[in-house]
Amino acid sequence: MSRPAPDVAQLREIAVTVALAAGELISAGRPNQVEVAATKSSPTDVVTAMDTASEQLLRTELARLRPEDAFLGEEGGYEPGRSGLTWVVDPIDGTVNYLYGLRAYAVSVAVVLDEESPERPDPATWTVLAGAVVDPSQSETWTAARGLGATLTDSRGTRRLTTSAGPRLGQALVATGFGYDAGRRAEQAAVVARLLPRVRDLRRVGTASLDLCSVAAGRVDAYYERGLNPWDFAAGLLVATEAGAAVTDFDGGPAGSHGLLAAGSDLHEHLRKALGNDEA
Ligand code: LIP
């Protein structure tokens, strides 16, 4: 028996509600001196007590509001469900910024459907249905629902987001990011050395979800990064695509940990070629 179509507007409201609650927790609850509670993939890949507390709040609230759904969180991993839907959350995206007291960090909450690998939602086969990215230090809330567009809510109200096709490569302001592994950073530095002379400038904000939302709002013309985890980009990817940006890997396929490039349609093609070494 086929499942009823998910109500993406209702899922978006749930994403916003729980992300705002976690945003309030991590901003109001940020200690003056944030301690490193543990490290993960490398000595610079850190977890704080607030990452864990934020994820626990999200897990509890989503289990209460959507008891049939599965959950995939950066800190606590996967919890199965029965509905076929999975919430993919990053309790604090930009943890290093949060640790240092820099203002670019966010809570990212998305819900995905992956009929091909329901047990382990895969960006290559998943459909992001709805999402929210909450930036507590800027009091900004970014939302999107599949087919219903993307919005930004701040102190001035709520506005719909639409991206342009983008400037030519030489005029493009491009955001990017670097991994926690030194070897990967060396590779990424080589790409930056090749790309920097060919664009307006680069920006390194440190928070993939906010970088993707910045593409949606035209605060940067493009964003690319290799090595992201699904929870870093799930919600931001839908905000960018619902605003009209193209978001793929460096070969034009589904975006994923192997590569993510977001930009207006024209710029996307030029940047993809540059990143894809097509002209090397
Ligand atoms: C971060 C990403 C960022 C990337 C960092 C890290 P985290 O996620 O948002 O784009 O450059 O290496 O992966 O670890 O703060 O959730």
Image (spheres, rainbow, N blue to C red):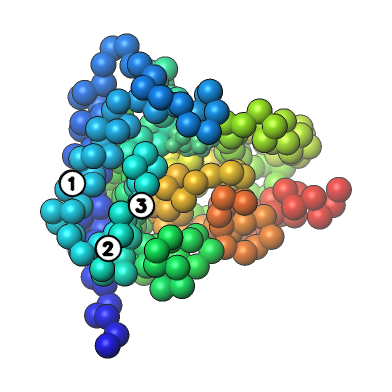
Q: Is residue 118 left or right of residue 50?
A: right
Amino acid at the residue labelled 1? Thr
Residue placed at 30% from the left, 25% from the top?
49
| C-alpha span from label 2 to label 1 | 14 Å
At mark 1, the secondary structure is helix
Q: Disc number at residue 78?
A: 3
At mark 2, the secondary structure is loop
The residue indicated by pointer 2 is 81
Coordinates of residue 233 in the picture (x, y in percent) = 46, 49
Q: Nearer the viewer, mark 2 or mark 1?
A: 2
| C-alpha span from label 3 to label 2 | 10 Å
Q: Is residue 27 left or right of residue 187?
A: left
Residue 63 vs residue 189, the one in the foreground:
63
Q: Nearer the viewer, mark 3 or mark 1?
A: 3
Residue 200 in view: yes
Q: Residues within 10 Å of mark 1 (few under 14, many from 20)?
A: few
> Cβ(mark 1) to ligand 1 < 8 Å?
no
Q: Quadrant of residue 161?
A: bottom left
Q: Disc number at residue 171?
A: none
The residue indicated by pointer 1 is 60
In contact (CB < 8 Å): disc 3 and disc 2: no
Coordinates of residue 172 in the picture (x, y in percent) = 64, 42
| Sequence-wise first label, 3 or 1 | 1
Vertical placement of residue 32 versus 272, above or below: above
At mark 3, the secondary structure is strand
Coordinates of residue 264 in the picture (x, y in percent) = 57, 55
Q: Is residue 255 left or right of residue 148?
A: right
Amino acid at the residue labelled 3? Tyr
Of all residues, the one furthest to the top in this rendering is 33
Q: Quadrant of residue 57?
A: top left
Residue placed at 35% from the left, 35% from the top?
92
